[in-house]
Image: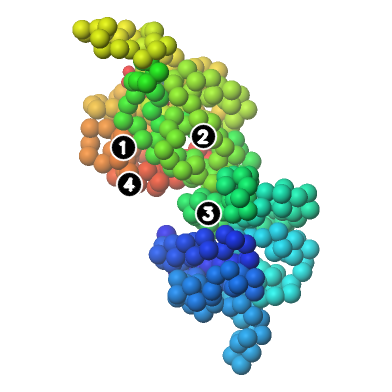
Amino acid sequence: MLENRHIVVGICGGIAAFKAAGLVSQLRQRGADVHCIMTEHAAKLVTPITFGELSGNDVTVDMFANINKWDVEHIALAKLADLFVVAPATADIIGKVANGIADDMLSTTIMATKAKVLFVPSMNTNMYENPIVQENIERLKKFGYEFVEPESGHLACNTTGKGRFPKLETIFDAIEKCLYGKGLLKGKKIIISAGGTQENIDPVRYISNRSSGRMGYAIARAAAMEDADVTLVSCTTALPVPAGVNIIYVHDARELDKAMNSCFDTCDAAVMAAAVSDYRPKVQATQKIKKEAHDSLTIELTQNPDILFGLGQKKKNQFLVGFAAETNDVIEHGKEKLKRKNLDMLVANDVAMPGAGFNVPTNIASLLYKDGTMEQYPKMTKEELGHIIVEKIAEGLR
Ligand code: CTP
């Protein structure tokens, strides 16, 4: 995915500098040509040899160290870069770039590059929340610099708060957005549901289904990459939240219904990728059901709301997308669902086919449209299908 891409990684003197080693290693494993520039402070925390070994290229720290070679290194790397990633980005480098200061190898190269620059701030919470730092970040964003939000949690200074170095997956989502995003959904709001609802029987047991949530998460990731304002309503907590996506966790169909409806009126597109339980136990026991009290047990079920149908009824200009998981007569059932639920597009899959449907990394889909047209796709990863679905939504919103 990063083959033939030249990525320059700037490493600053924050305690998370050691985590940049994992980032550099992963970038190289994913095919990128990686060049590292370290600040002098960073080189006191982790040795340049580490980054040299992991990147497979010389590491630059001192602007004047290679004076004999004299190919004006900061200009060479600034030109070479397809993307610049500053990780960890300290308050110092953010302040320097925001104010046009170029006084070492890293700041001069950032100033000289025309490539996108992605900052990954990581620092003590008070530093991060300092209004001067926040103002510098806002200023840089206005100039088109990109940022990955730090995570909240335990920090090296033995406090808890915002400022942690993000998960590598989150950084890679942002890297992909910088390299491949076309801004197809810029200014658009999209809500996506994912995963299988869990309908409580009692406080420890529930009825659910085999949905992993991967398809909905892939659509959310693809939509965020295309610059949409994405809200993901998730029935699962098992998957990493894609970078820049707002998350709402829900448990059962009624919570999902409430969350989708609360966002629907102001959105431009909605995708119901969740596998919703059509039924829930009529009575949910408040205490754990004990087997001593029952030789046999019958659980009476009552119907859940059809959330997608409800959204179809109230839709105005929203582009509404549903899924149909079928085991037979896929297209006929799909066409009928598209019409009955008043959808703009339906993703139909034959879950009986190997490599399609629940809990597998791939899918085999047909896209059916309101005007009666359809497109059939071969087996592909859910990530690939997510991008196609997002492109079709963008076309539909044009
Ligand atoms: N869906 C929903 N609310 C439900 C059931 C399904 O919003 N109570 C949505 C799903 O998220 C999916 C679409 O409706 O986008 C179709 O789901 P599917 O289970 O295939 O169809 P059903 O409408 O439940 O019909 P049936 O089970 O009878 O095939």
Residue 252 sits above or below residue 183 on the image: above
- Residue 383 in the image: state x and y as whole percent: 40, 46
Secondary element at tag 1: loop
Residue type highlighted by circle 1? Asn
Read off the residue under disc 1.
359
Residue type highlighted by circle 4? Met
Read off the residue under disc 2.
232
Mark 4 and mark 3: Cα distance apart in space? 24 Å
Secondary element at tag 4: strand
Identify the residue at image location x=58%, y=32%.
Answer: 268
Read off the residue under disc 3.
171
Mark 3 and mark 2: Cα distance apart in space? 18 Å
- Residue 283 in the image: state x and y as whole percent: 39, 8
Mark 1 and mark 4: Cα distance apart in space? 14 Å
In this view, the residue in front, 172 or 272, is: 172
Secondary element at tag 3: helix
Identify the residue at image location x=60%, y=72%.
Answer: 44
Quadrant in which the N terminus appears: bottom left
Lower sequence index among marks 4 and 2: 2
Q: Is residue 52 left or right of residue 79?
A: left
Question: Which picture quadrant has residue 113?
Answer: bottom right
Read off the residue under disc 4.
380
Identify the residue at image location x=50%, y=44%.
Answer: 242
